[in-house]
Image (tube, grey):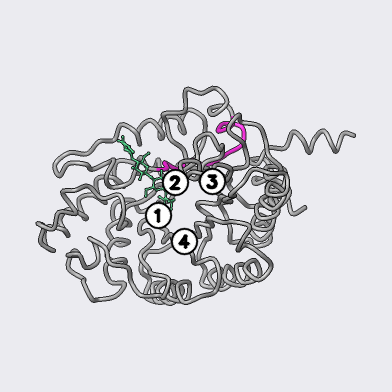
């Protein structure tokens, strides 16, 4: 009876603390004023990450002006509530302001802009953001590098030179904050496949040459129609090869898309959350298990018609079967 009561009082955060993992979620400060949103952030999580607030466009919408208002709110909330902040993201092909995308800038200007951006943003949150997704989603599914304003359109000086631009961004980030942990983050790299092979080759090379890289982020946007036994086995094996490089591993954007809200679908979703958390539990190099939002009320998945059920809490902040399954997985049960 006592054991059952203790179990039901164990939050995700408490379960993670007992199992080498911080538990994180993406947040939007517009919702801090909702009592349940705020209460759950404080009780269930130890890390928060701006879902959008530190991306290039919101924080650097105009060339000579940074807007830190959203990011500052998140950092202040975290500080007041003893949560850690994870930064997302400095170099990405998406969510760029029009002044970067309009094609008028030369590579030398792009270099000055990105260097200043990294120095300014990382520098402002030095000692407050404990880990950064320095570069996000730089590869295509076939393992080639994705076109990006920072790589080759026009790039900041390393177009056609492979992962050199990623290395340079990491070096700038390390210079701006010697202590923050620096991550490469991507989706579709969970299984062993051409994309994860390319990321593995890059990070192995970086580790060999002492390029500043501390970890790898696996986004883990999941769905029951493909997260099955084969996927899970490949995921676990893949984590191990990155762990063997000496990298820290963060699961950065876990969610589980559903196309209907039936008890059967919720059970499938619970299975996915459970199995992914179980693999994280078994891999000591996984130090963060983070979900991409936590309530269906405010999930990016809910903005897509017929896909509003991806989170462990429903739109009324009630726990779904996925919640208990996630917690059990974290606990290794
Ligand atoms: O901020 C503007 C606002 O000013 C405007 O009024 C409103 C009108 O639609 O749009 C607002 O921006 C939106 C922003 O979310 C904030 O709500 C963007 O249009 C919208 O594109 C953006 O979507 C975000 C998406 O990244 C952008 O690519 C999602 O919230 C966010 O969950 C999603 O997160 C990404 C990760 O960063 C990287 N991995 C994949 C993941 C899911 O796509």
Label 4–label 2 contact, CB within 8 A: no
| Span shown in magenta | 40-51
Residue, x 61% and y 50% (percent of image)?
21
Quarter of the picture holding the N terminus: top right
Q: Is residue 187 magenta?
A: no
Which residue position is annotated with label 3?
307
Q: Earlier in the sequence, mark 4 or mark 2?
A: 2
Q: Mark 4 near ligand 1 (CB under 8 Å)?
A: yes
Residue, x 13% and y 58% (percent of image)?
103
Which residue position is annotated with label 4?
187
Q: Nearer the viewer, mark 1 or mark 3?
A: 3
- 3 relative to 39 in the view: left or right: right
Label 1–label 4 contact, CB within 8 A: no
Q: Mark 3 near ligand 1 (CB under 8 Å)?
A: no
Label 2–label 1 contact, CB within 8 A: yes
Please tell me the numbered disc located at residue 86.
2
Residue 22, given in percent of the width and then of the height, sits at 58, 47
The secondary structure type at the circle numbered 1 is strand
């Amino acid at each position: 009876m006592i054991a059952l009561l203790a179990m039901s009082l164990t939050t995700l955060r408490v379960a993670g603390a007992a199992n080498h993992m911080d538990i994180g979620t993406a947040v939007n400060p517009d919702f801090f004023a909702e009592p349940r949103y705020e209460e759950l952030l404080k009780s269930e999580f130890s890390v928060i990450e701006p879902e959008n607030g530190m991306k290039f466009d919101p924080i650097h919408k105009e060339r000579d002006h940074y807007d830190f208002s959203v990011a500052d709110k998140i950092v202040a909330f975290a500080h007041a509530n003893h949560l850690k902040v994870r930064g997302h993201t400095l170099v990405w092909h998406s969510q760029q302001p029009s002044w970067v995308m309009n094609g008028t800038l030369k590579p030398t200007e792009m270099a000055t802009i990105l260097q200043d951006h990294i120095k300014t943003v990382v520098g402002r949150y030095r000692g407050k953001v404990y880990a950064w997704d320095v570069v996000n989603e730089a590869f295509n599914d076939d393992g080639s590098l994705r076109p990006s304003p920072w790589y080759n359109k026009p790039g900041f000086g390393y177009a056609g030179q492979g992962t050199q631009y990623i290395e340079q961004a990491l070096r700038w980030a390390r210079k701006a904050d010697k202590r923050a942990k620096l991550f490469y983050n991507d989706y579709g790299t969970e299984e062993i496949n051409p994309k994860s092979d390319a990321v593995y080759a890059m990070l192995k090379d970086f580790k060999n040459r002492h390029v500043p890289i501390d970890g790898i982020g696996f986004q883990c946007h999941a769905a029951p129609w493909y997260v099955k036994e084969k996927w899970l086995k490949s995921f676990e094996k893949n984590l191990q090869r990155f762990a063997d490089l000496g990298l820290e591993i963060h699961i950065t954007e876990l969610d589980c898309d559903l196309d209907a809200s039936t008890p059967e679908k919720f059970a499938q979703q619970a299975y996915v959350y459970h199995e992914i958390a179980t693999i994280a539990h078994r891999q000591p190099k996984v130090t963060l298990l983070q979900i991409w939002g936590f309530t269906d009320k405010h999930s990016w998945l809910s903005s897509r018609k017929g896909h509003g059920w991806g989170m462990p809490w429903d739109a009324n902040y009630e726990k779904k079967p996925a919640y208990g399954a996630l917690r059990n997985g974290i606990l290794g049960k």
